Amino acid sequence: MHFKDVRIIVDCTEFTIQKPSSPKEQQMTFSCYKNANTLKGMIGITSNGAINFISLYCGSISDKQLFIKSKLMDLLEPNDVVMADKGSLIETELASVGCKLQCPAFLRDKIQFDISEMVSNCRLSNVRVTVERAIGRI
């Protein structure tokens, strides 16, 4: 295991639901990303693939807001590491409780990654596949 410090691996997904009859509920559950009414779920797993956290909310919520509303941070301890995909914008929230975010690197101004970044990204991607499989099981 290359990521011994990782406490939880999180990812968000959306589940299509039947269109609610109430206009207010339609607005709350409408996802521009899916162009449908959805519930959004944040799934957390351990490094060995066991599902240990689920939070559901209306589909119109952002991944960052879902993370905050889920109260997962209340369950973390200082120096815990949370692994997420590179689109997660939760680093500041985690730092406020003494935790760290681990996610794949961005290319930024480079044309390609150096060898160490490439190996790290490959290892991270292999672990991230585990959370995608957990979502598939749900």
Image: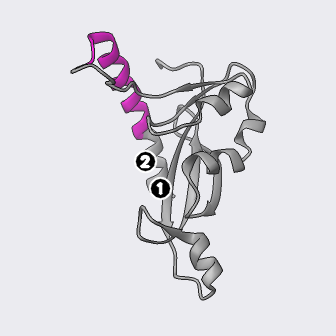
Magenta span: predominant SS is helix
**SS for callout 2:** helix
Identify residue type, mark 1.
Arg
Residue 90 occupies quadrant: top right
Left or right position of 80 against 59: right
Query: Where in the figure is residue 4, as x and y percent of width and height?
Result: 56, 19
The residues tagged by marks 2 and 1 sit, at their Cα atoms, a distance apart of 6 Å
Q: Which residue is mark 2?
A: 133
Query: Where in the figure is residue 61, as x and y percent of width and height?
Result: 59, 58
Residue displayed at 41% across by 70% down: 35
Q: Please report contact status of discs 2 and 1: CB closer than 8 Å, yes or no.
A: yes
**SS for callout 1:** helix
Q: Does residue 115 show up magenta in the picture?
A: yes
* Magenta span of residues: 112-129
Residue pushed farthest bottom? 21
Q: Which residue is mark 1?
A: 137
